[in-house]
Image: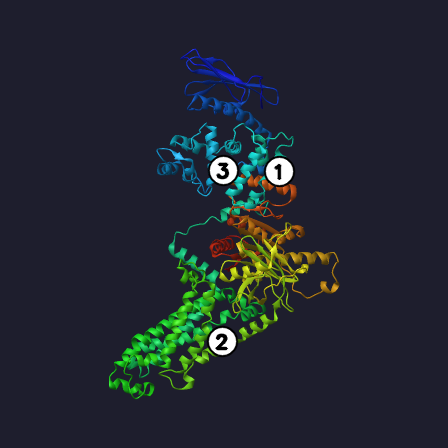
Amino acid sequence: MEIQQEEHESWSETESTGSRSTRVGFSGPLSGPLVSNNRKKLSARFKDDDDDLVEITLDVRDDTVSVQNIRGGDPETALLASRLEKRPSSLGVRLRQVSQELKRMTSSQKFDKVDRSKSGAARALKGLKFMTKNVGTDGWSKVETRFLELAVDGKLPKTRFSQCIGMNDSREFAGELFDALARRRGITSASITKDELREFWEQITDQSFDSRLQTFFDMVDKNADGRITEEEVKEIIALSASANKLSKLQERAEEYAALIMEELDPDNLGFVEVYNLEMLLLQAPAQSTHMNTDSRVLSQMLSQKLVPTKEHNPIKRGLRSLSYFIEDNWKRLWIIALWLCICAGLFTWKFIQYKNRAVFHVMGYCVTTAKGAAETLKFNMALILLPVCRNTITWLRSRTKLGMAVPFDDNINFHKVIAFGVAIGVGLHAISHLTCDFPRLLHATDAEYEPMKPFFGQQRPNNYWWFVKGTEGWTGIVIVVLMAIAYTLAQPWFRRSRLNLPKPLKKLTGFNAFWYSHHLFVIVYALLIVHGYFLYLSKHWYKKTTWMYLAIPMLIYACERLLRAFRSGYKSVKILKVAVYPGNVLALHMSKPQGFKYYSGQYIFVNCSDVSPFQWHPFSITSAPGDDYVSVHIRTLGDWTSQLKAVFAKACQPASGDQSGLLRADMLQGNNIPRMPKLLIDGAYGAPAQDYKNYEVILLVGLGIGATPLISILKDVLNNIKQQKDIEEGMVESGVKNNKRKPFATNRAYFYWVTREQGSFEWFRGVMDEVAENDKDGVIELHNYCTSVYEEGDARSALITMLQSLQHAKSGVDIVSGTRVKTHFARPNWRKVFKQAALKHPNKTVGVFYCGAHALVGELKRLSLDFSRKTNTKFDFHKENF
């Protein structure tokens, strides 16, 4: 429907209070006779595509605008016209509103050109929401309460508008929204009353799609002429990019504005109208968020089956929870139970032994407690070394079937549990001796001391210092002090520098402090052997059992360290490529040492003598076993990694325009080779992710830099796809065909990568593009999520979605990630991810591998258990935290 233009677009008014008349020009074909008593009649004529004339006559009084007559049109026209019945505050505002609303009505009629029945359109109709589940859920009452708190002299300043409506994290966007709403009402003030705020609130919470679209259009159309130019599009792109923390998109706002105008303004009119914007929104290519399935009935059945049924009987409910707990943790439970039984047995044995000796009559239960705790301490000090024998653990999990009963993935957690047992043993032993045994011996009678002479000498100790200065005393005290230091600095709040300490004390925390303090164990074990040899109450060598407990574990650990030292010296690597990416991520590509073998998902230890000659730090391998290099991606989160980045940054050159990474050093080019810091690697060592080959279907979830081991898995799956294709096409020799390599079980992989920053996608852009290019059969399904962008449907990300669809359709490249993989916005709906996997792979076992911060572990584990119990698809959950 188009407005029928007239040659003279003007109106006149005659006031009843005088004979003077005025004429004011306006943009819009309003005309009609004026009536006295401040009553005016305005008419507008419209012509639709079928040349049917529609005439709308408005009756304008002092404080009201009403529709007097409508000729022609349809019920929708009447509905649109009824929206003009407002209560403006002034004559100028009334007339501007009438003009603008009539223009909007004509544009609104063009909405019918778009088919809203399509699936993509149906999804888009739910979009452009200014109030989402995260904003505006409190309702008007809460907004009104905040208005009373934030208002100044009864008015809400524009600067506090975002806070009042609950859009705190998008102040600039909220400011533009405020301006658009104010322009529509002719408000020029920078503050609004509560009634005006109520009008604003009703408009931005309007459930009508047309209303939401018009509000968004008004934000772009800053001069309120019903048209938006390329410059206005550029401004709203920059605003949306800023609100979603997409700095790269903000830098290219002009380029993307030209792209939108090219799409919406093919006739080069220099502007677009609201219906053009709607066509772009509704007809943009649909973005597949998750795996597709055609089984709607099965989906409904599954949804009903997953509805939790509450058991009202507390006994049955408790038994069911207990059975689930045992089913999920039986490996951990039997190991912990065995450990506790051994500790309890050793304590009881020693307790009874000393209760039957003469010393019990002098020192009582203090000595039995001290000796029982000492026995468990000797056992735990031996056992605590085994979980950190990485080569042994890797060999056992890779070459034996023990992994079916032993949770090798929990080796570090078991190490921590044993450390807690050591702390208890040290506490009981030291406290019992220092506060009970020694004082009781000092105050014993001559008769009581008589049986003690073979152990403490003919002359009774005359003071407490006698016990402390002896070999048994000072070694024990030093052991306790060193253990306390190591145990304290190993706690997360010290190791990760979470405490807000003064600068001098801050230097005593962090990973370096943890690493060096933990190596005090060398002194501790030496003193423990000495302490266990110079015993007060045991004089025969075969009764001094400390060295017996420690001999084999210490020998195994010593061999481990010697092997690692020899192997790391042998595995000095040459740096092939270095890149420093956004998000403070350092990528290192190294030559593969002779005979170096590993599985995807494993990790290596890295040493850089330029930073520290002693420290070794673990990093997941991001290259695949079939690659001719070894790569790691290191995020600078601590002191050592920050120094490592600084050392390599000095040797790197700035990246050229066609290279990714802020700094690069490609050693393969051979010209002007800078001196690279020397690196040693040690490994590879086993990790939970290496078990992916046991599953036909794998679900990989990476959070931030936690995607590193999963990238290696993706590359390995991709290399297998290429190899199988080469075999089928006869491009490889028969000897390769007939090798006896274990068949590659994985035939379907789903990868979900969730990151906060747009720059993070630079880390693995090459891998993403390689998968998209070579995986023609769709074996690997990639899903990138950028959580800084607001969820789909939010008005703040609507323009980003439009741009993404246009750019991907035009060039096949995503505007957020810069790869061929489309980026999803906000966080994934994990329940939907698991649901679709269950529907897609019935009667299968899906290996779920997660690597990242601990925050997501609980939800993924719970969903794995829920869907395993309530569907015929089993989900095995494996995690790796950092």
Q: How far apart are marks 1 and 2 (CA)?
A: 67 Å
Report the side of 382 relative to 270 (left or right): left
The Cα atoms of the two marked residues, 2 and 3, are separated by 63 Å
Q: In the displayed structure, would residue 795 be above or below residue 374?
A: above
Instruction: In the rendered structure, find residue 553 and report the number of the disc placed on it.
Output: 2
Asked if residue 193 is positioned above or below residue 293 in the image, the reply reads: above
Most foreground residue, 277 or 775: 277
Q: In this view, does 293 lie to the left or right of 129?
A: right
Q: Residues within 10 Å of mark 1 (few under 14, many from 20)?
A: some
Describe the element under mark 1 as helix, strand or loop. helix
- Residue 596 x, y percent position in the rendering: 63, 67
10 Å neighbourhood of mark 2: few (<14), some, or many (≥20)? some
Q: Which residue type does callout 1 highlight?
A: Leu
Give the number of the disc on residue 259.
Answer: 1
Mark nearer the N terminus (1 vs 2)? 1
- Which residue carries the number 3 mark? 129
Dot 2 amino acid type: Pro
Q: In which quarter of the image is residue 404?
A: bottom right
Q: Nearer the viewer, mark 1 or mark 2?
A: 1
Q: In which quarter of the image is residue 140?
A: top left
Point 52% across, 37% down: residue: 128
**Relative horizontal placement of residue 509, taking residue 566 as reference (left or right):** left
